[in-house]
Image (spheres, coloured by chain):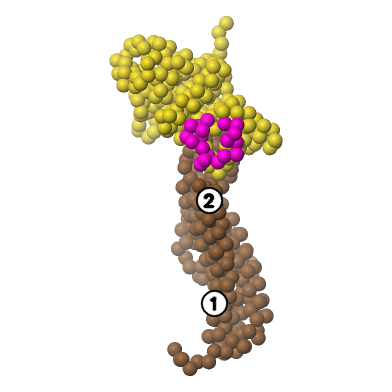
């Protein structure tokens, strides 16, 4: 029996003006996949992630979510691969594809629990008590049950990112996108965030993770993509890509970032 | 300056009821212009922020037109010129309210736009990533943070609106200055009358401004 991919990406391209950031990405994300995306800064790895929940609209190519192609083909003269996207459809897609940002982006005018409750109330239309109960459970899952009433300004970077993860989890996303979730953290705060992400991976959640933490990628991911110049340069199991890379560029990248024994 | 001038406030103080009527008129015009100016200003400010050019171009034209013409001219135009173009008369209150409100809308629109654009883009992105619509992200996430930052600038605008109500006297709307003019010409005592008018304005605005300072300090603490 073959399982259907949860997400299928075909021929994904993204240009910013004349600058081609993604030049044709093909990718199948299977249920429970934990895909680590590595690459130098400017290689397009964050843009790839942001195209999957349509924070950026692809310039060409198709993204499917559970077999459903998102958007409609709207070929232009100059670019036959163009698609048009309906904002309401993208809003529904984003409810199914959660994202955690490098800069946390917590809402500073709301408490930790208020941050987690917000979309439950406005998007899901849950009542106050129901949303509070769910939000409290998500905060407990990331180990911050006692910080529910704290405003973001009173939290450490690691705590902020854990609240942001709880906020994304509360929406029951089918896929979680992590965009360099530990890059803005002081080194001593990285571990607490990685532990939470690892526990989610062990639950079998489907996730894509852009990261520079190669050791973490090695232990948690089941697939690793190495992105260079807007394309998938090399991919495979963590062992193949990180320990026995076949491409010289991948090898050079891994050597530069090897901070851990693995 | 004649140092032998003998001040005599008695005729003014004997006619406080006349000034009271004016104060009611001032307050009414102020509240109307505050609500309409800030309310319509928010609409125009959001329009200026919009990506679609059929929204932001008219909004920009509106702001530039009303920022670059004097309020007094607008009030006179609404009072004297508009009734020629339209089949009905316009009362002094409507003319003054239109002029002051539209001018305040243009200025406050720029305050709203600046406030909205000062909020980190990641805030709206995080809201959208959770599946909130653009309108929900604006109303629940961006605007509450922006309004807090805009409070000092909006306070200034409010004070300006209060003082601009005196321009309505140019079309004989009954407000404080208009009533003062009346008293001064009846009693031949412009010095005392206008002194009292100035003091009344100060006594109205000073406590108001102090209250908003206190509010700003409180909001500032919550931010930290």
Task: Give yes or no for residue A83 being in the magenta stretch.
Answer: no
- State the image coordinates of residue A27 (x, y, percent, origin top left): 46, 17
Question: Could one spot residue A22 in this view of the protein?
Answer: no
Against B50, is A91 above or below? above
**Residue B185 in the image, given as x and y percentages of width and height:** 58, 87
Q: Nearer the viewer, residue B126 or B68?
A: B126
Residue A228 found in image quarter: top left
Task: Locate residue A169: give its quadrant.
Answer: top right
Instruction: Determine whether the residue tagged by mark 1 lies in a helix, strand or loop.
Output: helix
Earlier sequence position, callout 2 versus callout 1: 1
Q: Residue at x 43, y 29 (%)?
A: A188
Number of numbered discs overlaid on the protein picture: 2
Q: Which residue is mark 2?
A: B221
Which disc is residue A141 wearing? none
Furthest-bottom residue in view? B4
First to last magenta residue range: A144-162
Colour of chain B as rendered:
brown
Quadrant location, the N terminus of chain B: bottom left
Q: Residue at x 59, y 70 (%)?
A: B204
Query: Pointer 1 indicates a residue of which chain?
Result: B
Q: Is residue B44 above or below residue A60?
A: below
Q: Which residue is mark 1?
A: B198
Q: Is residue A198 above or below residue B38?
A: above
Other-residue count near label 2 (Cα within 10 Å), few / some / many at <14 / 14–19 / ≥20: few
Q: CA distance from mark 2 to mark 1?
A: 35 Å
Q: Quadrant of residue A46?
A: top left
Q: What x and y, as percent, mark residue A57?
A: 47, 31
Q: As rendered, which of B116 and B49 lies closer to the eye?
A: B116
- The tint chain A carries is yellow
Report the side of A260 relative to A157 (left or right).
left
């Amino acid at each position: 029996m073959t399982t259907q991919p949860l997400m299928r990406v075909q021929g994904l391209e993204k240009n910013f003006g004349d600058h081609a950031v993604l030049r044709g990405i093909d990718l199948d994300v299977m249920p429970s996949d934990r895909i680590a995306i590595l690459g130098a800064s400017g290689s397009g790895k964050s843009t790839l992630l942001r195209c999957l929940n349509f924070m950026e609209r692809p310039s060409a190519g198709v993204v499917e979510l559970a077999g459903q192609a998102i958007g409609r083909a709207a070929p232009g003269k100059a670019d036959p691969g163009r698609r048009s996207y309906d904002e309401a459809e993208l809003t529904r897609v984003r409810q199914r594809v959660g994202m955690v940002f490098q800069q946390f982006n917590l809402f500073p005018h709301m408490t930790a629990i208020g941050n987690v409750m917000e979309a439950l109330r406005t998007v899901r239309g849950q009542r106050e008590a129901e949303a509070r109960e769910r939000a409290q459970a998500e905060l407990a899952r990331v180990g911050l049950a006692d910080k529910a009433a704290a405003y973001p300004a009173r939290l450490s970077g690691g705590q902020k990112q854990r609240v942001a993860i709880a906020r994304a989890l509360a929406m029951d996303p089918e896929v979680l996108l992590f965009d360099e979730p530990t890059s803005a953290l002081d080194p001593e705060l990285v571990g607490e965030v990685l532990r939470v992400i690892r526990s989610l991976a062990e639950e079998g959640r489907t996730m894509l993770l852009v990261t520079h933490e190669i050791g973490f990628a090695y232990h948690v991911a089941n697939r690793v993509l190495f992105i260079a110049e807007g394309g998938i340069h090399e991919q495979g199991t963590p062992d193949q890509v990180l320990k026995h890379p076949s491409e010289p560029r991948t090898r050079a990248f891994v050597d530069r970032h090897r901070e851990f024994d693995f | 300056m004649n140092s032998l001038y003998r001040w005599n406030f008695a005729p003014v103080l004997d006619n406080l009821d006349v000034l009271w009527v004016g104060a009611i008129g001032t307050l009414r015009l102020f509240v109307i212009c505050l609500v309409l100016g800030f309310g319509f200003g928010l609409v125009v400010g959001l329009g200026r922020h919009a990506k679609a050019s059929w929204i932001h171009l008219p909004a920009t034209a509106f702001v530039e037109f009303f920022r670059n013409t004097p309020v007094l001219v607008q009030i006179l135009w609404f009072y004297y010129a508009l009734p020629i173009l339209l089949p009905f008369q316009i009362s002094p209150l409507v003319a003054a309210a239109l002029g002051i409100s539209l001018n305040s809308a243009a200025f406050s629109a720029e305050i709203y736009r600046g406030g909205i654009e000062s909020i980190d883009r990641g805030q709206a992105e995080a809201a959208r990533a959770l599946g909130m619509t653009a309108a929900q992200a604006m109303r629940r996430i961006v605007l509450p943070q922006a309004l807090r930052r805009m409070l000092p600038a909006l306070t200034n605008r409010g004070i300006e609106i209060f003082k601009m109500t005196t321009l309505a006297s140019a079309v004989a709307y009954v407000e404080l200055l208009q009533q003062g003019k009346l008293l001064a010409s009846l009693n031949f005592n412009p010095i005392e009358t206008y002194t009292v008018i100035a003091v009344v304005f100060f006594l109205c605005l000073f406590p108001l401004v102090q209250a908003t300072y206190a509010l700003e300090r409180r909001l500032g603490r919550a931010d930290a």
